[in-house]
Image (cartoon, helix red, strand yellow):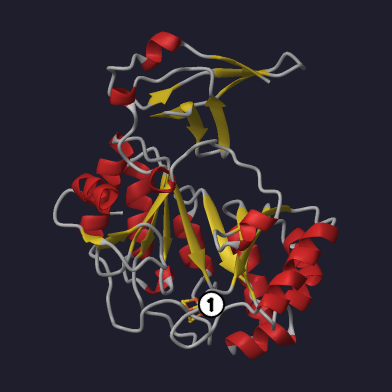
Amino acid sequence: MQFLVPWQAIEWAAPLHRIAPRASYRSGMIMPVTCKVRLSEAGVHLFDRRSGLNVLLDEVDVPPQRYSLAPRYLSIALTNACELRCSYCYAPKSAAALDVGRVIAWSTELDGAGCLGIGFGGGEPTAHRQFVELCTSVARSTSMAVTFTTHGHRLTPGMVEALRGSVHFARLSVDGIGATYERLRHRPFDSVVLAANLLRSITPIGINVVVNGDTVGDLDDLAEFAVGVGASELLLLPEQPTKATSGISDADAQRLLAWLRDTRCPVRLAISRSGLESEVPVANAIPGELPLDAHMHVDATGVLRPHAYARAGTLIEGSILNAVQALRELV
Ligand code: SF4
């Protein structure tokens, strides 16, 4: 693939974050692609939220004063509410939910500062009263990808239809298959199959799995499930310690690593930053990218943190970019 980039369109001084390169395939077909631009030490990052295409022009030296100020990706816990009671849940149990107007204002600010995607989670994000309105508003008013992670049990055909065109990727949490799932989540497995098919009808999806002693033996079946529902990614989340649980055991972590060495899983695999990722060959898409340039997290009380498990954070009062700067100085 060759990109024909109108360089004048990304004049460093321009506040423009969209350009329109054309992709020329060997077949000779020319496709128009609208890309958002992010500038960093790694180069010029082009991103198309509709296709999920990422191109890093790492041969371009970007002057430091032009680096995008926002993190590349921001996750937001819209609410702590969730009707499930998974024993390994890390979401705080205090009631909290974010105001939609604040989230939209933050999104606009981040969009203008080079953020490429925003991901809603919780708790359960679909439990937020204005979840659909929020997704449609952010998708309409920004050029960022809108994604969310859900347990799927609140989805209805009407809600999913209302989200069509406003969500660019959805992650469905599926901890175990069949009886394992039902034991951990106290919901029928058939319901999560239905949820996968509903989501897949409007957007590409990924399957998230918390890996622990209950689910590590189901990884082959989960990979098969992911293929069956047309998922494009299987994200492995080694269980993290919480007040209630000790996290994945060393023995189960070794089982996970052994599975990763042997699997021929046809779906793309991803793994969360949990310490284990250093023991598997992980593709580093943006070499040298600092953690706080890659990702930050906002919890349901409006505190910006380096990630969802981090203790340190800074309350967002007004501008989220001010909080981004304060967090970089704090950590
Ligand atoms: S579905 Fe997620 S948020 Fe809800 S209880 Fe389970 S782990 Fe926690």
Residue at image position (48%, 51%) is 167
Q: Residue 115: give x, y in percent of width and height.
A: 37, 40
Residue at image position (26%, 52%) is 327
Q: Secondary structure at mark 1?
A: loop
Residue at image position (34%, 72%) is 79
Residue 263, visible in the rendered structure: no
Residue at image position (44%, 58%) is 162
The N terminus: image quadrant: top right
In this view of the protein, which residue sits in the foreground, 188 or 77? 77
Q: Residue 239: give x, y in percent of width and height.
A: 58, 74
Left or right, residue 159 beside residue 228: left
Q: Residue 149: give x, y in percent of width and height.
A: 50, 64
List the residue tagged with mark 1. Answer: 153
Residue 71, visible in the rendered structure: yes
In this view of the protein, which residue sits in the foreground, 285 or 118? 285
Q: Give the quarter of the image for residue 99.
A: bottom left
Query: Mark 1 near ligand 1 (CB under 8 Å)?
Result: no
Q: Is residue 288 above or below residue 92?
A: above
Q: Is residue 211 above or below residue 113?
A: below
Left or right, residue 231 beside residue 14: right
Q: Give the quarter of the image for residue 114.
A: top left
- Number of labels in the image equals 1
Residue neighbourhood size for the residue with mark 1, other residues' Cα within 10 Å, grouped as few (<14), some (14–19), many (≥20): some
Q: Residue 59: give x, y in percent of width and height.
A: 53, 18
Q: Give the quarter of the image for residue 14.
A: top left
Q: Is residue 214 above or below residue 305?
A: below
The C terminus: image quadrant: bottom left
